[in-house]
Amino acid sequence: MKLLFFCGLAICIGAAAQQTSLPAGTHDPDGPVTPPSTLSSARPAGIAPALAAAEDKIESHDYDAARPGLLGYLQQHPSDARALFDLGFVEDSTGRQDAAEHDYSKAIAADPKQFESHAALGLLYAQTSRTDKALPELETASQLEPANHDPAAKAQVWRSLAQLQLASDPAAAKQSLLKALQLVPGSDTPADLVLTGQIAEANDDPDDALTAYKRALAADPGSAGATSGLAHVLLQQKKPQEAEPLLRAAIAKHPEDAGLAAQLATALSAEGNDAEAITTLEKLHQLQPANTAVSGMLADAYLRTGAADKAAPLLAEAVQAAPNNAALLTGYGQSLIYTKQFAAAIPVLERATTAEPKNEEAWGGLAFAHSQLHQDQQVLKDLAARQKIVADTPETLFLWATSYDNLHQMKQAAEYYDRFLAAAQGKYPNEEWQAKHRLVALGHGH
């Protein structure tokens, strides 16, 4: 949180209600995960005719016809890992994920060394955002051998591992992608290059990231992921003028891409073109009125340009749709403070700190709102919570000082006035004048 002082009145604003410069990885380079290939291409000699017939139907994508045959076979052979996987594949391919998860798990219990079920279950967990469950299944699959000995199947597992490891362990993600490419030399695609760029960024190697994204764009000029990644690096390097034309070209091909629009708005703002940045986000909001991320981006732009009256209703609606989103709650609380609705801001910001206890902007906003309501004891509690997260600023030091002063805790007030003056360095003349005069009154003249 930043507190800016104007003529003695502190107005609480955040550096951003939403981060509009979205990180690389906003676009999934490989798209949705899918089940691995069927087992029918590795059919052993002597397979039961009923099971073979069901697998023939799977091969021809006639899943509804395959299901009854598999169910009938499994009534007689309930621990057949191959048939259990086949049934899981049928359910997975027809969108019945709960049933597929059950069948894959039963196949693993019947044969813990079956590559296909571990891989399929891991991909299913990944598809449903259960990374903690996906990782161990895919890691197990990576150490097993597919029934058809197809290196591409193992490469798919290693690629999926790389995507999942990207956020938490980018060094491991790099090794996983390398293993995928080593399994099938020369198989790298533009999506692999985008993932390479994302991994390089996560490993603090922007030069390699730039190279990878540029190669991906050369291979696929329409790649939204490559454009987003390249623009992200350029924006990080404070080169918005280079990012802007790339983003405009990509948005012409992907007009409803919220990430690209947010990055273009960030580039335009960095160039001082806030008006067009807002226009860009307003157009996107018209296309996606229910997208809370877009609402947050637009509200942030309004807050940064002093249009809190426009930000507040957007954020109020977004918070209703996403009641536990700390960033949206923080932005909404800030918009209420901007419009001097201090009492209304407090419960909103309290919800933000509950959702994200280390939310320094929300704690700072709470401190300021409580100060405007003359609730000085609560101000001190808010500042103490913020102080555990991040160092004090001149603005928060001034709040400490004035709250102690109002509570007649003279020693602490004088200490914080001194600290404020040391940090202010002439940037807050009104507050510095007040601090000096209060120090004189407290017997600590400057």
Image (tube, helix red, strand yellow):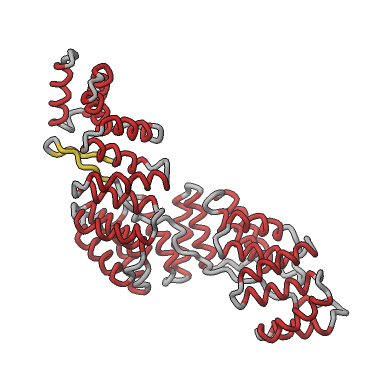
Question: In x, y percent, where is residue 351?
Answer: 37, 47
User: In this view of the protein, which residue sits in the foreground, 211 or 56?
Assistant: 56
In this view of the protein, can residue 260 be seen by the observer?
yes
| Snapshot quadrant of residue 365 | top left
* Residue 131 relative to residue 66: left or right: left
Q: As drawn, is 361 to the left or to the right of 50?
A: left
Compared across the picture, whether 97 is left or right of 117 comes to left
Q: Position of residue 61 (x, y in %)?
A: 65, 84
x then y, percent, for residue 362: 33, 43
Residue sitting farthest toward the top: 443
As drawn, 299 above or below 407: below
Image quarter in which the N terminus is found: top left
Residue at image position (72%, 75%) is: 86
Name which residue lies at 36% across and 74% down: 253
Q: Nearer the viewer, residue 122 or 22?
A: 122
Give 40 or 229, whichever is nearer the viewer.
Answer: 40
